[in-house]
Image: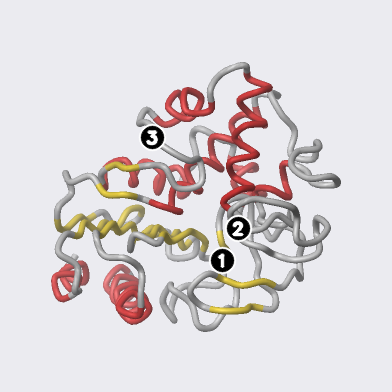
Amino acid sequence: MQALRQVDRWPCEHVAVAVAGRVEATHGEVERSFAWTSVTKLATAVAVLVAVEEGTIDLDEPAGPPGSTVRHLLAHASGLPPEGGRPLTLPGRRRIYSNAGYDLVAEHVAARAELPFASYFEAVWGFPLAGSPAAGVTATLRELLHVARELLTPSRIAPETLIEATSTQFAGLAGVLPGFGRMTPNDWGLGCELRDGKQPHWTGADNSPRTFGHFGASGCFLWVDPEAELALACLTDLEFDDWAKDGWPALADSVLAEGSL
């Protein structure tokens, strides 16, 4: 896919990018390990959903601050601040992006499973979680493609579970989409951000409203567009900044255009 070659013009020193689904292609340093930062949350959420399907936990059981559930934590609706501390509001009132919420939901799974969450995570994925469940994976594009393909055609979780995970949780909540400002609504599923009609956005103008995924501060992202039957995964070594706000949507639109030919 020629569209992937435009990453060679990005200001990062190292990059790896891939399309999966109806079209398969890779470009760049596909064997290099990169920090996934918050893209880790997609893999963590799937591991938590495996625990739900196994009956280890339930999405609507208490977890986190008073009144919060596993579902609240996965959907950034628990009221917790970004990095921990006392809740800023009651659960279900605002969409507050919270790394602390992912640490807590992982601790909840670990306690119920009587197994360290990192071990549970590796049993699900076959690659390690070396740090926080919110941002701790460092791995290659190959591992990120495992996540992409799971979110395209699930095998670790049931298709019905993926449908729920990619549906709006606690509809109508306003909040800040990191790097892009306040959104009303700021819709999220269980672990994934939902594109819907958000503007501006880090995906392309031609991505369908059903597109979902995540990006990370390390300049990486993964989105899945169910209508296009495509996923786009990218890892870089350059911190997210204005370059990504221009480059990522342009890449997405080029990939979608070429993928439709």
Left-right relation of 225 to 242: right
Tell me residue 8's x, y (percent). Answer: 14, 70
Quarter of the image containing the N terminus?
A: bottom left
Instruction: Name the residue located 14 percent from the left edge and 57 percent from the top edge.
Output: 28
Q: Residue furthest front?
A: 85
Residue 16 against residue 33 in the figure, above or below: below
Within-10-Å neighbours for mark 2: few <14, some 14–19, many 20+ = some
Quarter of the image containing the C terminus?
A: bottom left
Residue receiving disc 2? 82
Within-10-Å neighbours for mark 1: few <14, some 14–19, many 20+ = some
Q: Earlier in the sequence, mark 1 or mark 2?
A: 2
Mark number displayed over residue 130: 3
Residue receiving disc 1? 210
Q: Earlier in the sequence, mark 3 or mark 1?
A: 3
Give the mark toward the camera: 3 or 1.
Answer: 3
- Specify the quadrant of the image occupied by residue 103: top right
**Residue 167 versus residue 106: which sits nearer the camera?**
106
Tell me residue 20's x, y (percent). Answer: 32, 53
Q: Amino acid at mark 1?
A: Arg
Within-10-Å neighbours for mark 3: few <14, some 14–19, many 20+ = few
Q: Mark 3 touching mark 1, by CB under 8 A?
A: no
Q: Whole-Å distance between the Cαs marked 3 and 1?
A: 31 Å
The way the protein has been coloured in the rendering is secondary structure
SS class of the residue under badge 2? loop
Q: Whole-Å distance between the Cαs marked 3 and 2?
A: 20 Å
Instruction: Name the residue located 49 percent from the left edge and 34 percent from the top edge.
Output: 155
